[in-house]
Amino acid sequence: MLTPDQNRRLRHLFSTATELPPAGRLAFCARECRGEPELLEELVSLLAVFEREEEGTSE
């Protein structure tokens, strides 16, 4: 479970990552979450949902 500070950071990182081109998102996540595997897992999971929804709206 993430701490309140990690949750705040997660929201910020997610917002930043969604502004990046899809091809650069995973590298951004890995770089920003280095040493925090739980935060990385949550961020990647949220981005996967975001990308699925993004694909659904572009059809």
Image (spheres, rainbow, N blue to C red):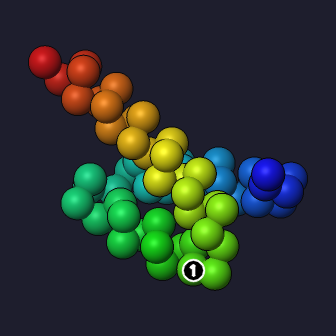
Position above or below: 40 against 7? below
Position above or below: 15 against 5? above
Query: Which one is nearer the viewer's eye here, 58 or 36?
Result: 36
Q: Amino acid at mark 1?
A: Arg
Position above or below: 36 against 9? below
Residue 44: x and y in percent read: 47, 53
Q: Quadrant of residue 9?
A: bottom right
Left or right: where 13 falls relative to 47: right
Q: Residue at x 78, y 54 (%)?
A: 2
Q: Residue at x 42, y 34 (%)?
A: 49
Q: Which residue is mark 1?
A: 34
Residue 21: x and y in percent read: 26, 55
Q: Residue at x 56, y 63 (%)?
A: 40
Q: Residue at x 35, y 60 (%)?
A: 25
- Label 1: how many Cα within 10 Å (few below 14, some 14–19, many 20+): few
Q: Determine the secondary structure under disc 1.
A: loop
Position above or below: 58 against 38? above
